[in-house]
Amino acid sequence: MKRLPSLAATTLITALIVYLLSVPLGPLPPAGSFFHPAMGFWANAETVGVTGDITFPASAATDPVDVFYDERGVPHIFAQNDADLYFAQGYVTARDRLFQMELQIRAAGGTLSEWLGETTIEYDRHQRRLGMQYGAEQAISLIAENDTIRSVLQSYADGVNAYINSLSYETYPLEYKILNVEPAEWKPINTALLLKYMTQMLAGRSDDFSMSNTIAHFGEEFVNTYLSGRSDLMEPIVPPEKEWMFNPATITPPNVRFDPSFTDDIQPWKPDPLNGSNNWVVDSSKTAGGYSILSNDMHLNMSMPSIWYEMQLHAPGVNVYGVTLQGTPTVIVGFNEAIAWGLTNTGADVMDWYSITFRDETKTEYLHDGEWLSVSERIETIRVKGGPAITDTLIFTHHGPVYESGEITPDSETIQQNHALRWIAHDQSNELLTFYKLNRAQDYSDFKESFLTYKAPSQNINFAAVDGDIALQTVGRFPLKWQFQGRSVSNGADSRYDWNDFIPYEQNPYSLNPGRGFLSAANQYPASPDYPYYLGESFAPFERGRRINDLLGEMESIRVDDFEEMLMDNFSYHAYRLLPALQLAVPADSLSDEEQLYLSRLDDWDFFNEAEAVEPTIFHYWWQQFYDHLWANKYDTIYPMTRPDRDLTVDLVVSNPESVWYDNVHTNKVEALGDIALGSFRDAIDQLTNEHGSDSDNWQWGAVRNTNLGHIGSIPGMGVKNLFTGGGAESINAIRGSHGPSWRMVVELDPDGVRGYGVYPGGQSGNPGSKTYDEFVNTWLEGELYELTFLREKPQERDDFPLLVRFE
């Protein structure tokens, strides 16, 4: 009898342990299921690559579909019709990247709080107010009118869901177990939402508010010179000798421009301003093989797993290889047996904010051309894990959704508290139709026609074909604007600020078979100043584009190895132009012996941002300090402002060393260029010493770069850290921290057989427990390219291509 209390206590403790192992503790998953030896995270460990023990529903495909995985885990899908092809693509993509697919969609549409709770409510609300869900619904409504693409999307979704339905807790991707959530059903609208998310990444950045403040603070002359000007070294994408053989449409600006005064920026999140890319193409006159060669490297955030997924799609009428976005059927960038293509971002202004005048506090009517128009409303419900759902009512004008802000402003200032967004992402669109056609294109005419209906995000597409044609085409739908329209906040009550028309596609910038034998794009201005339409201001500085053109202009008898080396080119035009001027300006007799030693290290630098070198580190720290010394005191304000770009600042230093802009307006102190150069150099050395120690041998560029491939869900321990990289934002090898070449590709357009080469930083599998999770990272780091296994016909079963999957 004395043992009963002990037995009762043991029973109680056991019950408590069982309970604690079965319920989530805060954000953590239930410990019992997570640590279960058979079904928990241990089940996600893989000791071999892809295996063939896959089962499918009996009705998975109309006809047999074969999927071959090569030695790098790249699937090669062979189907007998489109429906089966895209079903299989959805299935195998989900098999490798399901968590990534769903996370991207939740981030795009503002449904992260269903997984993560109240910490992401404001982010979700922001995505809803930007109209991301609305834009996806607009796209789906247009897609529904096209039987082909509607079928493609449904087949892809069916494939994803077939894989999801095959899962149990044991086989869930690891991240689902960590978050204690289940995969959701995949819907066709998810693909539309993902494509709108790419529009947000690449065409979702607006400086309207900060430019309005800068104009109000400095005046238009300063903005026109230092913010809207072009460097003398800027080479446009389309060769400047191009003649525009059309009569451009005209538009009349208002006599007096709208002055929005000072306003706060209402965007809590913006895409990286350096999202961009390089691409170039040369014709047969410049190659050793006598055929065109094309190259592309896309600069985006580099993560684990990668934003890209590599595959081949083969069916009647299509045989294409390249990379795709997880969640999107077709190949986005790549090649087929006749053509190749690559992407770079355009940066044109397709996102305008409008000041809205409401009739009263009910905000049911707003002023437009002297009339009161009615708003429409949209109810958004944000579901929150562990908490009540939140309802948000969105107001729409004819411009688009209204983003309300309520910042407190001094009485002496005027703040516009309500702004409507006119954005290309809200328009009906069917970008998937473009890539469906492009995958099947056979020549330049097909390529050009593929983009006829393409709207966003606007891109510069390079092209090459086995018949010898090369081209570069700016694609997208651009509003017809008067000069500087949309540069700052627009008057929502005046129809002259509306998007009333668009530039005809055939009048977009392009070049076909130029006499110089090459074309390139690096996110700079698409065309020279004589191009008759205004496209905006957010284009890259000249450095990468000019370096590419310098190299291509000199190169002859080009081989793939030459482009492989060129993709890793670390030359800094920025340092080449600026450093001599700074060194000349520094009063050497004012430096200490130690400072003189540091400065002298730059004397023999060749301006290459090599990982092993110390000189790039000293220069870039000096540049950042110099830039802040020069501009910070002029921008001493509570409002967001736009500062001059890197290349225009260098133009100022090089061409006007006596400028009044060197004066410190905050302290009313007259300063010379030398004062800023000296003070910023000293501050740079102090910063380097504080961050990396006094031993300059620890200042190697590759060691201070902080190049990490973090996990897409920010889960510790699932990324790749401390990569030793060279390059820089201004180099062709545009690595900047964790941002840079997310896919490198070179394609030979040999009429006897197209050959491709490529690599991305990551691996095919999205499972951190797989040996293929980070398989490609070292190859990418060394600047090497894999020869891509492009199959012309279905292989026979053999050791190098074991048949691993069959749908039938």
Image (cartoon, grey):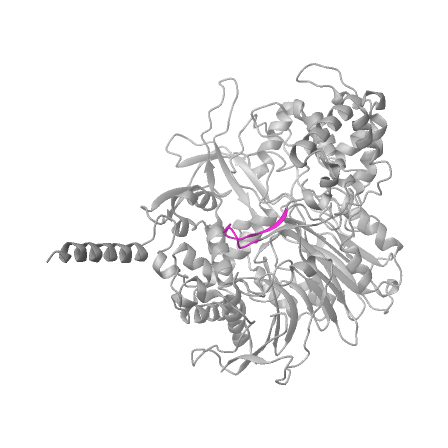
Is residue 346 placed above or below 751 in the rendered structure? above
The quadrant holding residue 71 is bottom right
Q: Residue at x 51, y 72 (%)?
A: 87
Q: Answer left or right for 213 relative to 612.
A: left
Q: Name the spot of residue 275 as percent of width and height, x first.
A: 64, 48
Name the magenta segment's main secondary structure.
Answer: loop
Is residue 262 placed above or below 775 in the rendered structure? above
Segment tinted magenta in the rendering: 707-719
Q: Name the spot of residue 290 as percent of width and height, x first.
A: 86, 69
Q: Name the spot of residue 516 as percent of width and height, x first.
A: 87, 56
Observer able to see residue 372 = yes
Q: Residue furthest left?
A: 1
Q: Answer left or right for 132 relative to 586.
A: left
Q: Name the spot of residue 794 as percent of width and height, x first.
A: 63, 82
Q: Nearer the viewer, residue 355 or 786?
A: 786
Q: Nearer the viewer, residue 305 or 356?
A: 305
Q: Nearer the viewer, residue 699 or 489?
A: 699
Figure disc tally: 0
Q: Residue at x 85, y 50 (%)?
A: 550
Q: Is residue 289 magenta?
A: no
The quadrant holding residue 165 is bottom left
Is residue 781 placed above or below 350 in the rendered structure? below
Q: Is residue 718 magenta?
A: yes
Q: Quadrant of the N terminus?
A: bottom left
